[in-house]
Image (cartoon, grey):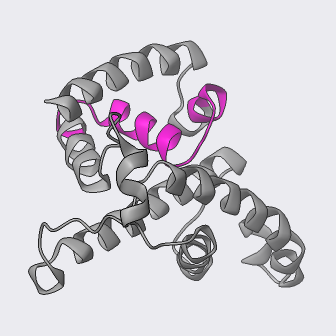
Amino acid sequence: MAKLEWTGDDKSALDRLTPFIYSELRRLAGGMLRRQAPGHTLQPTALVHEAYLRLVGDDGLQWQNRAHFFGIAAQCMRNILVDRARARAASKRGGDLQQVPLDLVEITGGGRTPEILDLDRALTLLATMDARKSRLVELRYFGGLTAEESAVVVGISATTVARELRFAEAWLHHQLSA
């Protein structure tokens, strides 16, 4: 992608690409944060800024195309969300106590959104059994990539992506509902 341009002599390439990268990362971050449990405090802009700094600041990162870049961005955002969730759960910050604003108590009702730490544990367990399925869920859930984009990142067909995602999502649903 364009990092190849901005790692060379053309430093203006980053300036030209930033608005496009930023708006796409902002859309992905908004989608991720909408799926988080009530009470999270991270805003999409803050998540994008932290992820962007990690992506642009890591000179060791190389990506081949748009889908690969956003796959790396999805993994980066997942790590940020997991790190923040772990910090919130630390005993010095109240341990397992969940902060729920009173105005949300009646609204949340039946459907439970999986906590990010529960999802991370389940994805880590899935990765021990099948790393590719875990990666595909990460690309879809955290990166918002389509089956076709995920296929490019992982190097398999879109049909295989769809089949493996169905299995992984069913497995995760079973793990998270237990």
Q: Is residue 49 above or below residue 173?
A: below
Q: Magenta span has 141?
A: yes
Which quarter of the figure has residue 41? bottom left
What residue is shown at x 61% (from left), y 48% (from top)?
68
Q: Position of residue 121 (x, y in %)?
A: 20, 48
Percent position of residue 104, x then y: 41, 56
* Figure check: 133 above or below 144: above
Picture quarter with the N terminus = bottom right
Compared across the picture, whether 21 is left or right of 91 comes to right
Judge whether residue 50 can be spotted in this image: yes
Tag count? 0
| Residue 164 falls in image quadrant | top left
Magenta highlight range: 127-151
Q: Is residue 15 left or right of residue 77?
A: right
Q: Nearer the viewer, residue 73 or 27?
A: 27
In the rendered view, would you say 31 is above or below 51? above
